[in-house]
Image (spheres, helix red, strand yellow):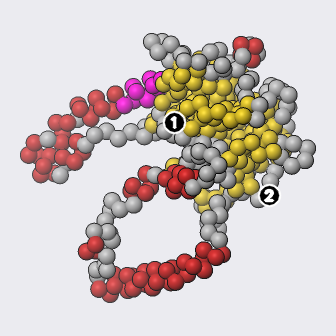
Amino acid sequence: MEKVAFADGEKIGVIGEDGVSFYESETIARYREYAETRQKNDEWKYSGEGARFRGDTAKNAAVQTDAYVNGVAWQDGKIVYAYTVGGSSGVCRRPQDPKAREEHIYSASDAEILSVQTLGPSVAVTVKRDEATSQVGILDGNTSELVTFTEGDARDANAAFDAAHPMWILFDSAGAGRLANGEFSGQYAPAVLMRLDRETLALEEVKRDGKNSCVKPKTDADGALYYIRRPNKERRDSVVWDILLFPFRLVKAFFGLLQAFTVIFGKTSLTSDMGTGNNPTSGRKQDARKLFVDGRLIDAEKEEKRNRKRKDHTYGFIPASWKLMKAADGADEVLASGVCDFSVGREGIYYTDGRHIYKLSGGKETKLADTKCCLSLCAEPSAEEFDF
């Protein structure tokens, strides 16, 4: 059985013949240790009468550090992974021996590495430097030199080497939407699949769907193209549902108008006595349930509830409208639904829906593992594929 590496939150997992093993990112662990040590050294500032007088005692709370493993790949039997922690990002190489130390390849405080995919010593990466745009490039795993190939007002992402043509890089590209004042609107044009020739730097469009975004292109050794198709905007309500909800929305609108009138002229709120209203902590739990998946903000809890209603399959928190596709001369083939990432291996295709990892082979689907939050995975290539 070929091994499959995957990112599960801030941990790295490996599926093998002996089951599932998990590894901790040493970089993330060191950062947490440093943050906790620094807080402990500063405890004297937030204790005693002086601190209580200044109101600084609240700063003695537990350290909260957001950390993520953004992507995983294989390189010479080791796991290459991209991470984000405490305002910095980078790429490391982790041996499978739990006692061995990991190698640091690249780090940056002004950019975030969102994806990795390897070919020999080279690592294809997605580099994000601002709110709206990102570029694709190559990171040298030996010298740590990073070169980006794209530019412009677009989100270029999910760089991957073409398995049939190693000098080509596949990626998806979506133009950033702008308001009249030039600010990012938070929306993108439908993403298209692109191909870059590393020798000539020539760009070519590979796949376009006017109604949907095509993302995460990958190929097999025969040159067959696989990708994820997803709608640019999820449609939830039908016309009938809108008609049924109209009276309730009308009452809600009237109550909102009355609420605003009361606040403006009465200097109070109709809901202030209900424990909600201007409560600064309200809504935080709802926001915590939302997460960015490949540039798209989704409500994981709501999507998981919707997917539980589907009886044909066990789904995670990825919308069922996100389809794993295989390109064909006629209509492209749908291989799976609710997919946020996949990998083309020697023995089959592996994909994740955020909560599970599946293998597709010979028309049969097999669940390999349950996860907490898996957004990236990669099957281990053969030894011949490492030698490039």
Left or right placement of residue 119 versus residue 183 in this view: right
State the residue at coordinates (57%, 24%).
15
The answer to whether residue 62 is left or right of residue 242 is: left
The quadrant of the picture occupied by the N terminus is top right
Is residue 358 found left or right of 99 in the rendered image?
right
| Residue 29 inside the magenta-drawn segment | yes
Name the amino acid type tagged 2.
Answer: Gly
Q: Could you tell me if the residues under marks 2 and 1 are in contact, i.e. CB atoms within 8 Å?
A: no
Q: Position of residue 349 (x, y in %)?
A: 71, 32
Q: Is residue 150 visible?
A: no
> Depth check: 210 or 84 in front?
210
For label 1, the residue is 371
Q: Residue at x 56, y 45 (%)?
A: 316
Query: Where are the magenta residues, as a range?
Result: 23-32
Location of residue 360 by image quarter: top right
Q: Inspect the image, locate mark 1, and give the three-letter code of the amino acid beneath it.
A: Thr
Query: Does residue 193 belong to the magenta stretch?
Result: no
Q: Does residue 248 sit above or below 99 in this rendering?
A: below
Residue 377 lies, in percent from the top left, at 61, 32
* Tag of residue 210: 2
The residue depicted at 34 percent of the width and 85 percent of the height is: 262
What is the tally of numbered marks visible in this picture? Answer: 2
Label 1 environment density (alpha carbons within 10 Å; few <14, some 14–19, many ≥20)? some
Q: Main secondary structure of the magenta part?
A: helix
Tell me the quadrant of the picture where the C terminus can be found. Answer: top right
Q: CA distance from mark 2 to mark 1?
A: 33 Å
Q: Nearer the viewer, residue 1 or 76?
A: 1
